[in-house]
Amino acid sequence: MIPLLEKFRGQRAPLPARLPARQIALAGLGAALAIGFVGAVADATHQPLLLGSLGASCVFLFGLPEAPFSQPRNVIAGHLLSSLVGLTFLKALGPHTWSLGLALGTAVAVMFATRTVHAPAGSNPVIVFLAQPDWSFLLAPTLLGAVGVVLVAVMFHCVVRPGRYPLYWFGRDAEPRA
């Protein structure tokens, strides 16, 4: 087979193990509570607090809470930095597909450089370019929405999980990888 096509076959590794039914149910319940809470606060305050990428954040916060990208630092800072980068590029360079590409690439690099990687936040520059909001987008929905889902996650995990969540807020410095 042609070497390039051979790579597309993958390694034929087994699928990851299915989560236990209780964990699946709790992940769904936590996600529903988090978005429901943020939505209710948005309705009560007449503030736009819901952001599409927050739904994806809930997958990680409630399904894989021990992962580094599920920690509050990553969720909040990842969303905030990615929206900031998106807005900066939109305002400085205009709503062009090439500037969106630069914004997204920069947002990814910034999250890795600051150790605040949160994959759902990678969609924030795209959301910014589609909606073309003003700078207030950083506060609502970005910051307040991310803080809202994190607060629900912290309270939820305190009640339903035997372990601790979060694993860290700011953490200690780790040695860089070679």
Image (cartoon, grey):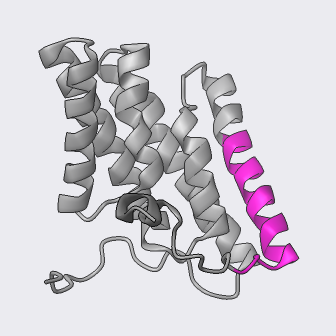
**Is 20 one of the magenta-colored residues?**
yes
Residue at 37% over, 24% down: 128
Looking at the image, residue 147 lies above or below residue 72: above
The percent position of residue 91, horizontal first and vertical second, equals 19, 16
Task: Using the image as rendered, state which of residue 170 and residue 57 is in the foreground.
Answer: 57
Quadrant including the C terminus: bottom left
Q: Residue at x 59, y 76 (%)?
A: 12
Q: Which residues are magenta?
A: 17-37
Q: Is residue 106 magenta?
A: no
Image x and y of residue 115, in percent: 26, 65
Where in the figure is residue 72, as x and y percent of width and height?
44, 62
Magenta segment main secondary structure: helix
Q: In the figure, is residue 160 to the left or right of 113?
A: right
* Residue 125 in the figure: left or right of residue 177: right
Residue located 17% across and 60% down the image: 113
* Image quarter of residue 52: top right
In this view, 84 is above or below 150: above
